[in-house]
Amino acid sequence: MTAIRMFSSMLLLVLMQSGALCARRFRGGRNPQPRRVPPPPTYRADRGDTTESFPLDFTAVEENMDNFMTQVKNLAQSLYPCSAQKLDYDMKLNFLENTSVTCNDGSPAGYYLKESRGSRRWLIFLEGGWYCFNKENCESRYETMRRLMSSSKWPQTKTGTGILSPLPEENPHWWNANMVFIPYCSSDVWSGATAKTEQSGYAFMGSLIIQEVVKDLLNKGLDNAKVLLLAGSSAGGTGVLLNVDRVAELLEGLGHTGIQVRGLSDSGWFLDNKQYHCTDCVDTVSCAPTETIKRGIKYWGGVVPERCRQTHEGEEWNCFFGYRVFPSIKSPVFVVQWLFDEAQLTVDNIQLTGQPVQEGQWRYIQNLGIELRNTLKDVPAMFAPACLSHEVITRSYWIDVQVKGTSLPRALHCWDRSLHDNRNNKAPPKGCPVHLIDSCPWPHCNPTCPTIRDQFTGQEMNVIQFLMHMGFDVQKMAQQQGMDPSKLLGMLSSGS
């Protein structure tokens, strides 16, 4: 057995070193793409299954072969750009076993799954995509964005990116997890629990879809999970805040008390602030955030976390706003939020359409960053860059954005470690921050922010060009900061 362990360790070390070389060779830019190669002759295990594996003969380790080969194949998945293997990295579509839980139009709800049989970690991702709040704008949404209300044209497979990627160079800490992507087809911020009626014209079952997906996954290996991370972006990020405790309670009620349920909310921490200027409430873009949710929660039959409902009884719409619902959440949640979120600015009627912003708009944008910082100050685990953007965890560039020298994947890994150490009564790891928020005061003052392009020319803009484009007055700002304009420009250029 000692010889087996030594041999296994040596082989795994060689594979890991090869993987590191391969990752460096093929990274090549900000948006690495999986490279498909022609399939070679396949090597099959003696037991006759169709799973591809390395042509290795270890007679001496026969009794440990299944477990050993699982580890080797999982590591080999990271090497496929350099190998002669054609590996399957796509998530595959599954429809719910409970056919009574549907998308808006009554078509079956479902999920995409990529299993990783050697892993006890599961990541369930909730897609975003705004919402509708009455029959008229739901009908308009159905005509223009049908894939967000129906499963009739969903593809059979989906390739994961960012935190859903199977590539370790793009997803260093979660690449080997069991990946689940739940398409958003309920238009209710994942809160609804209502069947289709003649009055509404649509079903709103977002919360029920999540519950049914979890139940289905228990028969596919989730019952043996150690960690379940419920993640989501935009409306999906808000959906995480609304559902993470419900998922934990569901699993506990079914007897799966050993599964640690956590949440990761990306770009779903919206503010119920006053709009820059008020307009008639016609659709999700023109309405004030509070007004759309007040109307929507009634139309959807929306369900909110019980503790938050008790706190805001009669005004349950409050629970859709991060800073109001967060104190009532029992499960650990990591919050990712751009300080200058494009979706927040849109509903606040700040239209960044390529024209320089007015001084009042500029002040409003800066105040938005201040307000957001204030609502996040008591969140123990969070990542908030001073960037103008929306959504990040499924973007290929998510590994490039940093706050105070720490990347988002690194911060999430530190959070994982701190939760593990906390359960084992260990001191939190040093030099591993989990509360990261930019302190600089304007959009894109962080030099690692995603690239901004001019909406009309398509050309990339640096920080100075972007701020000038928005009507930023260098002379005036330098005067306010009590410094020379050339020094301020230098600081902006370096991202200070």
Image: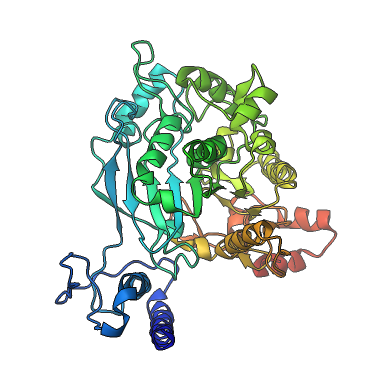
Image quadrant in which you'd find residue 165? bottom left
Residue 58 seen: no
Q: How many numbered tags mark residues here?
A: 0
**Residue that protrudes farthest toward the right in the picture:** 482
Between 305 and 105, the one nearer to me in the picture: 305
The vertical placement of 312 against 216, above or below, is above
The vertical placement of 264 against 62, above or below, is above
Residue 109 coordinates in the image, percent (x, y): 32, 34
Q: Quadrant of the C terminus?
A: bottom right
Please state if 385 lies on the left or on the right of 107 as rendered: right
Residue 291 coordinates in the image, percent (x, y): 58, 22
Residue 177 coordinates in the image, percent (x, y): 43, 59
The vertical placement of 344 against 315, above or below, is below
Residue at the spot 38% in from the left edge and 49% down from the top edge: 180
Residue 11 coordinates in the image, percent (x, y): 38, 85
Q: How is the image coloured?
A: rainbow
